[in-house]
Image: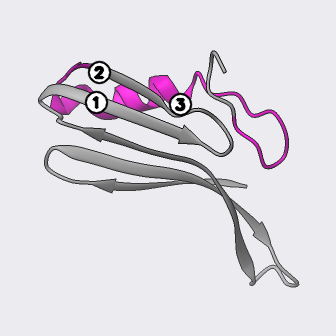
C-alpha cells in the first residue's frame, strides 16, 4: 500500500509517498522505497513546489499560492502522477 506522509508548517508543507507492505506477519509492516519527496515553500506568497520521484528529473513549479489552497494544489499535482509499476511513480511529462 502507498502511504502519504505530511509535515505542515506555517509557510511550508513537506510530504512523501512511500510503499508499506506486510512482513512475515500482518502485525509486521515494512517501509519500502520512498516514491516521491516533495515540498511547497513560500505559502501565502509566491510558492515553490518541488517534486522528486525516484529515478526521475526533479520538477519545480512556482506560482502564487494562498494558505487555504496549498493542500488542494498539492493534491491536484499528485493527481497528475502516474503509477507505472508496483514500486514506481512517474511525474507527468517525464
Residue 10 vs residue 59, the one in the foreground: 59
Between disc 3 and disc 1, whose residue precedes? 1
Residue for badge 2: 62
Q: Which residues are magenta?
A: 63-89
Coloring scheme of the render? one colour
Location of the C terminus by quadrant is: top right
Question: From the viewer's perspective, is residue 43 above or below residue 37?
Answer: above
Q: Residue at x 85, y 84 (%)?
A: 25
Check disc 1 and report the residue beneath it. 48
Q: Position of residue 20 (x, y in %)?
A: 70, 64
Q: What kind of element bears circle 3?
A: helix
Which residue is located at x 35 percent, y 32 percent?
Answer: 49
In the figure, 29 relative to 79: above or below? below
Residue 19: which quarter of the image? bottom right
Question: Left or right: 72 with respect to 77?
Answer: left
> Disc 2 and disc 1: Cα gap in Å?
4 Å
Label tally: 3
Check if mark 2's residue and mark 1's residue have beta carbons within 8 Å: yes
Q: Which mark is residue 78?
A: 3
- Identify whether 16 is placed above or below 28: above
Q: Residue 40's x, y, as percent?
A: 31, 38
Which of 23 and 82 lies nearest the eye of the viewer?
Answer: 82
Measured in 3D between alpha carbons, the distance from the residue under mark 3 to the one under mark 1, in whole angstroms, is 15 Å
Amino acid at each position: 500500500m502507498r502511504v502519504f506522509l505530511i509535515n505542515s508548517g506555517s509557510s511550508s508543507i513537506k510530504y512523501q509517498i512511500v510503499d508499506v507492505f506486510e512482513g512475515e506477519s500482518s502485525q509486521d509492516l515494512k517501509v519500502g522505497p520512498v516514491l516521491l519527496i516533495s515540498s511547497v515553500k513560500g505559502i501565502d506568497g509566491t510558492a515553490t513546489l518541488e517534486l522528486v520521484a525516484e529515478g526521475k528529473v526533479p520538477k519545480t513549479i512556482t506560482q502564487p499560492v494562498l494558505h487555504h489552497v496549498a493542500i488542494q494544489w498539492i493534491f491536484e499535482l499528485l493527481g497528475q502522477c502516474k503509477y507505472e509499476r508496483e514500486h514506481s511513480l512517474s511525474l507527468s511529462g517525464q
